[in-house]
Image (cartoon, rainbow, N blue to C red):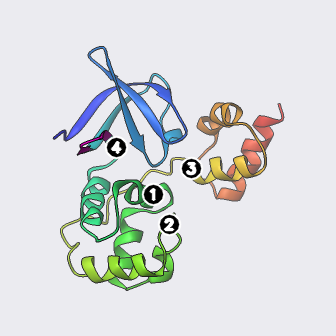
Amino acid sequence: MYDYIKGKVTDIYSSSIVIENNGIGYLVNVANPYSYEIDEEAKVYLYQKLAEDENTLYGFKIKEEKMLFLKLLGVKGLGPKVGIGFFATGSVSGIVDAIERENVLYLKKFPKVGEKLARQIVLDLKGKLGFIDTNVETVDDGFELVSVLESLGYKSQDINKVVPNVDKTKTIEEQVKDALKLLLK
């Protein structure tokens, strides 16, 4: 089992990245691939799914995401493909808070999570996540901005060029305006 990998990001795909370490490129499924940049040195915390017909790596920017992901995998009916989706738009603190407050509506916003699965998550995990540090600072990786720009019809390669140049401390509305200005240049 791998804990993490450090290396250079060489490729970015729609749901994964390739990290090169010692001449080997590792394909890692991540929630927000566009939060990484080509040639960036990255440390990614890993979960390896081994099955008879599968050997897949799932990656996380912070250790707390991986810890929560591992707990989510213990929920009946929730696999790694659904579990990684929680971190595309949710933060560790938001997800833990939703589970503790039994906020099924919040949990249903994640891909492939319906009423039944959301209730199962609450049932299985409520009161069992106290060891996860929810005060950890999560990075605004621009995923929401990428989603908005894609919905406006811009191509991924154009979006990837402008997203790193947008100030992520601004509101999403200001980020979209800045990105549109850069796209129209």
Q: Are marks 1 and 3 in contact (CB under 8 Å)?
A: no
Q: Amino acid at mark 4?
A: Gly
Furthest toward the right, the residue is 184
Residue 169 visible (yes or no): no
* Magenta region: 49-56
Within-10-Å neighbours for mark 1: few <14, some 14–19, many 20+: some
Q: CA distance from mark 1 to mark 3?
A: 12 Å
**To which residue does mark 1 refer?**
85
Marks 1 and 3: which is nearer the front? 1
Under tag 4, what secondary structure?
A: strand
The answer to whether residue 78 is above or below residue 14 is below
Q: 41 and 76: which one is in front? A: 76
Q: Position of residue 6 (x, y in %)?
A: 28, 29
**To which residue does mark 4 refer?**
59
The answer to whether residue 178 is above or below residue 122 is above
**To which residue does mark 3 refer?**
143
User: Which of disc 3 and disc 1 is earlier in sequence?
Assistant: 1
User: Which of disc 3 and disc 4 is earlier in sequence?
Assistant: 4
